[in-house]
Image (cartoon, rainbow, N blue to C red):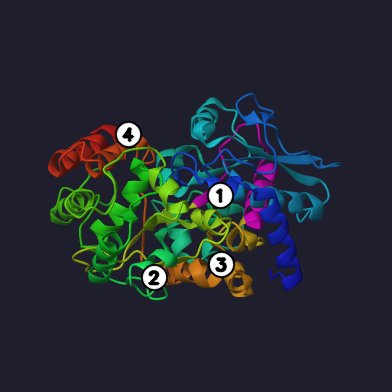
Amino acid sequence: MSLDDNRVDKRRRKFIKAAGITGAVGLAGCSGGGDGGDGGDGGDGGDGGDGGDGTATGTPSATPPDADTVISYWTLFGGGDGVVMSSIIDKFNEERPLGDGVGIRRQRVPWDQYYDRLFTSLTGGAAPDMAIMHGSLLRRFSDVLVNPVQYFDSGLEEYYLASHSDMVTVNGDPQAVPMDFHPAGIYYNKDIFEEAGLDPESPPSNWEEFKAAGDAIVSETDNHAWVPTPYQDGVGSYRAWSSWVKQAGGELFNDDYSEPLFDNEAGQEMTQTFYDMTGDWGWAEQTAEENWGNRVFQNGNLGMVTNGTWYVNVMRELDDFNWGFFKPYVAPGHEQNAAWADGHTIILPQSADRSDEKTRLAAEAARWITTQNPEWGSEAGHLPAAQEIHDSGALEEAAIYDKTLSKFLEMAEAEEYFFHPQFPSGDPNDEGVWSWLVDVWAHNAEPEEGLQSGIQNVNNAIGN
C-alpha cells in the first residue's frame, strides 16, 4: 500500500497537531518506563475508562456502528505512537477490510500498568482478542498464545521481512504477528559538533572517531559528550552497553537465555568504559537522576545520546533543533556490527470463550494492521515488519527516511541486530535487572562490583 504525497502531508499534519507537546516530552524508552512513544502516558487519541472485561483501564475507542463482531485490542502506545495507532484503528473501522460486520475496539492501557494487567488477563481467562507484546516476552508466554499463522494463506515469510519473522518464532513456531523493530542508534546535536570543530555532516563511524568526538566536545565546548540513555534507566543503559559487548565479540547469554555470559572480557571492558566516561574522561555528570540525559540533550547541552526509533518524534517536535543520527557501531575493540533491538508484535491470547471464526478474524485483523499501514514507519518512526510496506516505496517518501529509517533498514538487511533477551521466565524489561549499569555510570558501584551484581540480577530473574 502506498500513499500519495498529499495524503502523506495530510496525515503528517494531523499527526503533529495531535501529538503536540506529548511527543517532545519523551520520558523513558520503549521497553521500560514511558517514552512519549509506546511508553509515555501522553496523548494517544484519548483513552481512559474500562476495557469492557474488568481488567483494563482507559476509555475504549468507540465500537464501530453495525459491527456484529467486535475484536478487542489492547495497546500500550502513548504519545506520537498512540496518535498513529489510533488513526490506524479508525481507518480499519471506516474501511471495514474484513467485511462490514467486523470492527475493532482499541483499548490503551498506560505503560506502567500494561504488562501487569495483560499478564493477569492471560492467566485469568479475561484476555483481549489481540494485544501488543514485545518480542522479548514471547518465550515466557508462548504456552498461552495462539499461533496466528495457521489462519493465513501462507507462512510469515510471504508477508514479513525474514529478520522480523525470526523475532516472533519460538522453538520453530510463530507466536505472534510481527509489527516492527525499534532498534537503538545514536542521535546527535549538529550545532555542538560544529562548535567543537567537528564536521556536523560526518558523524563517528568507529571507536576512534567516537572517542575523538566526545573528547572534543568536552574540551572545546561547555557541553556534555554522550550518555547511553536519555532517561538514566537500567533498561536504556542495557541497550547501549549490550550493543558494545556484542560489537566487541562478547556473548551476553547462552542460546536459550537460561544463563548470563556477559562476565567476559568484552563485558568487563564496556563496564569499565562506562565508569571512565563519567570519571577521568569527564564526558557527563556522575548522576542517576531520572531523565537527566533527556533534559540536557533537549536543552542543547549534550552532544550525543543513544536511543531507539521512537525518539525521532521527540527530535522533530523541537523547534530549531539541528539534529542528526548515526549507526551505533562505535564500540572499543569493534569486531562486528551489532545493535540492540526489540519489536512490537500482536499476540492472540488463548480463550476458551472465543470461537475459531473470531480467532481467524483477529489473526486477519492483526495482519492488516501490520501490513497495510506505512505510517507506522513514516510517522511513528519504527521499522515496519511488512515486506509490502517496504516494497511500496512509502517509507522513502517519509521526511525521516534519510535521517533514520534508511539506516535502520540497512542494519536489518545486513542482519546486524540482536534481540533483547527472551527469558524463559522473568521479565527482561524489569528495571531492577539492569539498574547496576546506572550505578556504575553514577559511580555508586565499582565496575567489577556492578558486573557481578548484574549477573546475580539476571540469575534471580530467570530462577537460577
Query: In which quarter of the view is residue 249 placed?
Result: bottom left
Looking at marks 2 and 1 on the same chain, the residue that comes earlier in the sequence is marked by 1
Q: Nearer the viewer, mark 1 or mark 4?
A: 1
Q: Are marks 4 and 2 in contact (CB under 8 Å)?
A: no
Expressed as whole percent of the image width and height from the top left, the position of residue 258 reads 26, 43
Badge 3 crowding class, 10 Å Cα cut-off, few under 14, some 14 to 19, many 20 or more, is some
Looking at marks 3 and 1 on the same chain, the residue that comes earlier in the sequence is marked by 1
Q: Are marks 4 and 3 in contact (CB under 8 Å)?
A: no
Mark-to-mark CA distance, 4 and 2:
38 Å
Looking at marks 1 and 4 on the same chain, the residue that comes earlier in the sequence is marked by 1
Tell me the residue that label 3 is attached to.
400
- Amino acid carrying label 1: it is Ala
Q: Secondary structure at mark 3?
A: loop
Q: Who's the residue at 56% across and 59% down the image? A: 316
Which quadrant would the C terminus be assigned to in this image? Answer: top left
Looking at the image, residue 227 sits to the left or right of residue 201; the answer is left
- Amino acid carrying label 3: it is Ile
Between 361 and 83, the one lying in front of the other is 83
Badge 2 crowding class, 10 Å Cα cut-off, few under 14, some 14 to 19, many 20 or more, is few
390 over 92 or under it: above or below: below
Expressed as whole percent of the image width and height from the top left, the position of residue 394 reads 64, 71
Mark-to-mark CA distance, 3 and 2:
22 Å
Q: Who's the residue at 65% across and 49% down the image? A: 19
Q: Is residue 379 magenta?
A: no
The residues colored magenta run 344-369
